[in-house]
Amino acid sequence: MCDFSLQAVASRAANVGDKLVTTNFNKGTRGFAGTDDPNTAVCVIPGTELAFDAPIKGYGIQDKVDGPSVAIFRQINKNNPHQHHDCLELPDGTRMLLTYLAEGQMATVLQLPAAPKTKAEADEQERLPIVA
């Protein structure tokens, strides 16, 4: 359910209201864990909206007091199974891979995407399968 790099980590689906923390899972990647269970990856589906407790920090984002604190979860590089796919889309359209996020940031799941009404919407929300 999560990016291929987390296939060896226990995981669960995200729910509205979940409190998450960016976590280094010691598998060569970062992702989200619940604040109540730091060893379980919390997998979000594309289109999920997240609100961070402070401006988002990570590789490639300038540290700003008034920086973005909301993002939409997306997947990129879908045609390349051996690249990281999970990313955040910031309000200005910038996309940042989750693995580049600074560890220890707190976020809340604001809402999950609406149920798809077309095949294109369903394809957009579908997570890539785990590659062995």
Image (cartoon, grey):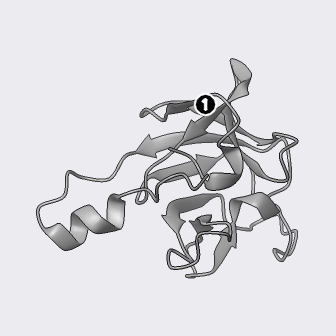
Residue 105 image offset from top left, x and y in percent: 78, 44
Residue 96 image offset from top left, x and y in percent: 69, 71
- Quadrant of the image occupied by residue 94: bottom right
Residue closer to the observer: 96 or 107 = 96
In the displayed structure, would residue 106 be above or below residue 121?
A: above
Residue 35 image offset from top left, x and y in percent: 70, 25
Q: Residues within 10 Å of mark 1 (few under 14, many from 20)?
A: many
Q: Is residue 67 left or right of residue 107?
A: right
| Residue at 61% over, 52% down | 132
Residue closer to the observer: 32 or 5 = 5
Residue closer to the observer: 68 or 73 = 73
| Residue at 85% over, 53% down | 28
Q: Is residue 76 left or right of residue 45?
A: right
Tag 1 residue: 19
Residue closer to the observer: 51 or 23 = 23
| Residue at 60% over, 30% down | 19
Q: Is residue 23 left or right of residue 1?
A: right
Q: Can residue 29 be spotted in the picture?
A: yes
Q: Can residue 56 be spotted in the picture?
A: no
Q: How many marks?
A: 1
Q: Looking at the picture, which amino acid does disc 1 mark?
A: Lys
